[in-house]
Image (cartoon, rainbow, N blue to C red):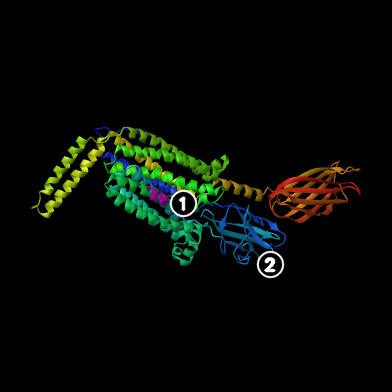
Amino acid sequence: MTATAPHPGASPIRRPFTAAALAAALVSLVFGLLLAGAGPASAHAALTGSDPQDGAVVATAPKEVTLTFSEAIAVGDGSIRVLDPSSKRADTGAEPKDLSDSSTVRYGVELHPGLPDGTYTVAWKAISADSHPISGAFTFSIGAPSETTVALPSDEVGGGPVGTVYGIARYAAYAGFTLLVGGAAFVLGCWPRGASVRPVQRLVVRGWVTLTAATLVMLLLRNPYTGSGKFADAFDLDGLQAVLDTKPGAALVSRLLLLGAAALFIAVLFGTYARREDAVEKKDLTFGLAVGGGVVAAGIAATWAMSEHASTGIQAGIAMPVDVLHLLAVAAWLGGLVTLLVALYRTPDIGSDAVRRFSRVAFGSVLVLAATGIYQSWRQVGSWSALTGTRYGQLLILKVALIAVLLAVAWFSRRWTGRLTDAAPGEAGKDDEAAEEAADPVETAGDVDPARAAQLARQQAVLTATKKKRIRDADPGRSGLRRSVLAEAAIAVVLLAVTTVLTSTEPGRTEVEAKGASTAVTAPAAGPVNLSMPFDTGGRNGKGTVRIDIDPGRTGSNELHVWVDGSDGKPMDVPELKVALTLEAQEIGPLPVVPDRLAEGHWSASGVQIPMAGEWKVDVTVRTSDIDQVTIDKNVKIG
């Protein structure tokens, strides 16, 4: 995108229309992104295993059911429920036991003794270590599968209207933080005179109000967001107390306390600091505000780092400070960009020196973002396949593309910055004289009636606004810079929306690990199994072929048929035939099978139980005489 200076004769009326059209398109795109990511929040912890496994058929009732997760979770009463075929609780109802060790996150619930045969449903829900709710369900069977009347909710935890509002509040919190921190940093570091400029003051205050309101909404909705999904539960005092006892709840309360300190910072910045005239005193106050404001800003950023992505997974001790730096750099760049846009459009007072100082701040912020972003991407994605094959990776690619476009537009802004000029003192004096002349009628209108005085005051306001607009539009470089900065701000808003969706999306590394565990345990049904294995016992008439059929070839009860053919291809009777099944990956077996002879060369066994899917080894022992015997085996995938 290129930016050009407006033609001297161009009508100024077209500019507001263009800005309005861009704003409308921007709002549509942002809401589209938010709605696309406003469904049930994807898990950041994943179920990687269970005992019994999903779809398994066990011969006897287990004493307990255990679930294994990819990272730490928070559970409570009812987090794991086991329901029998009639939808009654099969577990004791106690709080899940923590069976975790140094390398595995595992929880279990005890079952009632003497459970009858049938299909049982395990429904679970928990809070991931990075504050996102997760849930799921699976089944296993005792003895043999059966019909079940269990009806689970169709909506995942964290979804529905509550999830949508919570997601919008999450976006508003990021936006408010960006405006608050970026606007204040712009004033202190780039444009100290901006502390007395009303539009800049309003921008920073609105950032504080937005962040505070969004944090309160998230705190109230935290209980229904992770639980019932009903707005009415937002005012459940017991639920609110439970939220305050969790890490996300503590982070939100800490953020509110820090926002109280931020309110004091804003009052000093736009009060005492804005009115201070002495250069030395103002310099000292600038240093004090920069240190204090930096501490408060880092503390607010840490409330995200301590409760979301950075707080869990590998290298959390490094990831949290890196995440704080990342958020501060985003705020300094994007928040400062919006403040610069407001200053360029709403006031003629900002000089070229302030714009150039912000250009240097933005460049430094981009370097910090690049370094921290590369580390975060490696940590959350982990592989090229996860980058392209997961939703998190695809959103990350989109984010990088938006940053590239933003940097390209910023390059044009940098060119316009080099062309900026400040108004000459003589011109400024002429403008001041014009303003004074415009004010004379009001000043000398002591005997004029109130209506006439009000009319003259309105005329003076129009003349003053016209003067300011003339100053703003006099510099072609300033006009070009305004348009390029507006484009940057538009892209920044979309970038912030994508970043918000990323925070509620399962990291690529976790998704790949969960898929791998799921594939290894619950391979899809491959249908009936047909095997053919030649054998040679070494004795007379000891050569032949064993053919095996396992039907339907999936977990649960199966029919097994064995045919033994001699070297001439005709059915062959043998004194002894045994079969065994072993799942070496899970250390299950060998499970012996002793088939019955049905006819010459044909044996069969019914009700052969295969407890779980996987790569099974089938061992067949054939004895052709009192001393001639051989055991042959073959691996086969059974779903």
Residue 613: where, in percent of width, then height? 68, 51
Quadrant in which residue 611 is drawn? bottom right
The residue that label 1 is drawn on is 302
Q: Is residue 11 visible?
A: no
- Write the residue at 83% across / 43% down: 535
- Is residue 206 within the magenta segment? no
Instruction: Answer above or below: position of 218 versus 366.
Output: below
Question: Nearer the N terminus, badge 1 or badge 2?
Answer: 2
Q: Amino acid at mark 2?
A: Pro
Quadrant in which residue 360 is drawn? top left
Q: Amino acid at mark 1?
A: Ala
Whether residue 312 sits left or right of residue 279 in the image: it is right
Crowding at dot 1, Cα within 10 Å, few <14 / some 14-19 / many 20+, comes out as many
- Is residue 294 within the magenta segment? yes
- Which span is picked out in magenta? 290-297
The residue that label 2 is drawn on is 113
Q: CA distance from mark 1 to mark 2?
A: 48 Å
Whether residue 247 sits left or right of residue 198 in the image: it is right
Residue 122: where, in percent of width, then height? 61, 60
Q: Are marks 1 and 2 in contact (CB under 8 Å)?
A: no
- Write the residue at 46% across / 42% down: 399
Whether residue 529 sits left or right of residue 87 in the image: it is right
